[in-house]
Amino acid sequence: MKLFKNFYHNNAILSSLAVITFLIFQSVPAAAQDPDITGFDGWSVVIDPGHSQTENMGIYNFSEAEKVLTIALHLREMLLNKTDISDVYLTRDNGSDIVGLTQRTDFANSLAADFYHSVHSDAGPPSANSTLLLWGGWLNFQNQIVEKNSTGGQAMGDIMNENLPSAMRIGTRGSFPDRTFYQSGPGNQYPYLHVNRESNMASVLSEGGFHTSPEQNQLNMNEDYLRIEAQSHFWSYMEYLDIDRVKVGILSGVITDRETGDPIKGVTVTANGSTYTTDTYDSRFNEYSNDPEQLSNGFYYLSGLTPESELTLTVEAQDYFTESVVVTVNPFDFTFADVDLLSSLPPFVDSLYYDPQEGLMPGENLRIEFNRAMNRQTVEAAIEIAPEVEYTVSWQNDQILRIRTENFDYLTEYSFTINDSALDQFDNMLDGDQNGEEGGTYTAIINTTSEDTDAPQLATSYPLNSGFNFFNEDIIQLVFNEPLNEEIIEGLAIGLVSSSDADPDFTVSYTEMNELGVIQLIPHTPLITASSYDVILSSGIEDQFGNATEAEISLSFITSGNGIVNPRYIDSFNQGVTDWWEPQQSGSTSGIVTELTSRPHETEDQLSQKGSSGAMRINYGWDEASNGPYLIRVYKGDGLRFNANDEMLAYVFGDGSDTPMRFVVRDENNQLEASDWIDISWIGWRLVRWEMTDETSNAWVNGDGNLDGELFIDSIQLSYTKGESAQQGSIIVDELKVAQIELVTSNEEELSSNKPQSYELNQNYPNPFNPSTVISYSLPVASDVTLNVYNLTGQLIANIDQGSRQAGIHNINFNAGHLSSGVYIYRLTAGNIVLTKKMTLIK
């Protein structure tokens, strides 16, 4: 299940009647003849493992559907083998059938079961991992919680909210009425989720952690780990029926590396004659990865132990010292005992970041990385460099040492050694010669290069010199062949000269990336269309070695005759990025390194020069061991409506990685259509445009290549091409909007469109709206503004824009997903001007 989203309704292979007949035949085995636990007789439950086959793929190729089916099968086995229950039903009991939502609830209703439990896990960013319980309920207009007529879901949810996070040892978001969780405030008086709304009995949906959490989903791959979640549900059923727990003897935990905290593969855990070996690549992880080193969970599970007994837990692993721990077995709950092991391998130099072919440029850092955390003082004392030279050191962490080399001579060979008096943090001696035993000196030969005496050169520009058709909203870039001295740039004379009007105001920005230096000129207002401009940089541009240009640099270009008309924001990102899913929340995202992939709100490197106060950064990391497909889908899937007469535009801060990027929209036929892939070959800000026509549209998933009727944004997507684009990096997206691009017949007309003659507050669009709308206002001069939303009683609901704004048209996106239906007032205050309008929210 996706966080904060409804279930996806699959088209079922089997008809409802066929599924019901099949499941009734499959799911009514006999109860235990001599049950250990009584009190279930006369009570029936439908256990619903959510989704089908391998739907909702989690991180590392293990899906939610596979996980929850295993839990449901274990739970049914426990109920039938240990209790006097007579009826346990599953809505599916295999991983091949596709069962739709309606089929599941129709099946349960046909049985007139006493309880319906839908088992799920959640999706979100890699750092998110918690439980959640949702039962059929809502808030009435007196702000009181109301449960659906078949009560009992709340009671079960509250019980599970104690047992499930305790068993999984993660946090909880709580137990909630589902309508209130998804739509806060009083409103619709019926359950939100299909399984709660359409089932005729008491019901609850459980979210057992996040299958997009790297740590959690590696644990999920272990079938015994899933017994723990099933056991917690089993105990919750007992508590719900007022049945006391019986004694158990379950010992479990995770074995980790003491220094890194990483779980360890292939650990042997022994207690009271029982032995368990943690998962290895050969025993389990080869099913999900081609990289033997990628996955580990360190999980062990011992059952059948004598309750209340004291036993010794012995933990052994190759290349680690053995540990023994005394444990007392909890008689009525899980006994958890985590153990960290200390590596028995001696420390050694894992890598020296130095290219013998290119040599070391004096002034560059020499970077040494050890295989484990070191005692810094002993390492520094053990370093010898010949011939002798003054140097300073710094540490990135206890494993990475940097040596500053500004005092090194050019064209000189240095012998760099670390003798074996260097110790790690556990006093193990350095294995300098890497023979697997302590002792021995590490030695490397470092050759320095000749002195850099060349001034930086302009490698390319955007636009090119003597270029034409430069779009008047775009950003000018000057790319140099090496990093520059940023302090010098601030004092240089840099000009942007217009041939037809006053010289525009602009901000100079500097970016350093991929061994290049990029100077950007960001105009505060659009340039004049069909006009010529000159960019002039004075001499004195320095590289980082003090070499400076002696001549002035200049280039000229001509802007196109087209300009933006009727711009409307899809998202300015000023208010955050919560409307956009994390990449891991989309089942389409694949081939990523999840720890490196995210979509945070960027509030430092946004286009503040154009009035922006926020942007969306997309961090990407691609898994080279994966066979693909490689795709990051940052999903929004709602908001402003537009059509193919519009053009889509966004400012994108590129990292020069050649990472392919595209926009995807959904049309009135619910079909997905995508722009062409755009390789992000530039560094710094650039305006990316999609002229939305059928000729420029590409079918994706269910699309047909045609942009039919009303459109709205589905997602921004990134991809990866091995050997061509970067494996890791990030881009920033800002000021995402649609507009008509039209020929401006004269400079006066464009100036008029960009500099309104009066203060205006326009009617929001769309109106009525659900859940978001765009509010547009115009300023004839730069002004301090406040844009607030109020309810009809005058209560302030939201402040959606505030600050100093340039003259021109401003479009503000307002998301009202948290509000109830009704009429709201929005008010613009600009200087002494106050303008007010009404808008209607319908849900």
Image (cartoon, rainbow, N blue to C red):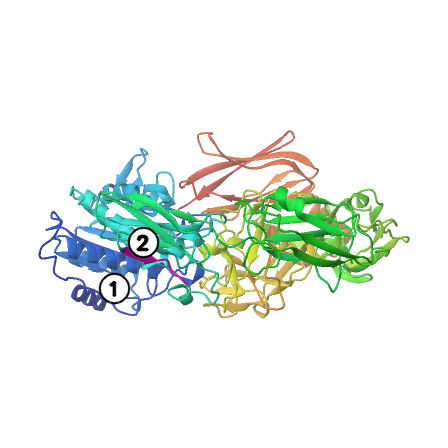
Q: Closer to the N terminus: mark 1 or mark 2? A: 1
Residue stretch rendered in magenta on the structure: 274-280
Q: Name the side, left or right, on which 804 lies relative to 414.
A: left
The amino acid type found where label 2 is placed reads: Thr
Q: Secondary structure at mark 2?
A: strand
Q: Name the side, left or right, on which 460 lies relative to 425.
A: right
* Foreground of the two, 452 or 767: 452
The residue positioned 82% from the left and 62% from the top of the image is 466
Read off the residue under disc 2.
270
Q: Residues within 10 Å of mark 1 (few under 14, many from 20)?
A: some
The residue positioned 17% from the left and 64% from the top of the image is 24
* Foreground of the two, 635 or 190: 635
Q: Position of residue 32 (x, y in %)?
A: 12, 57
Residue 587: within the magenta?
A: no
Q: Name the side, left or right, on which 142 lies relative to 288.
A: left
Q: Report the number of discs.
A: 2
Read off the residue under disc 1.
93
Q: Secondary structure at mark 1?
A: loop
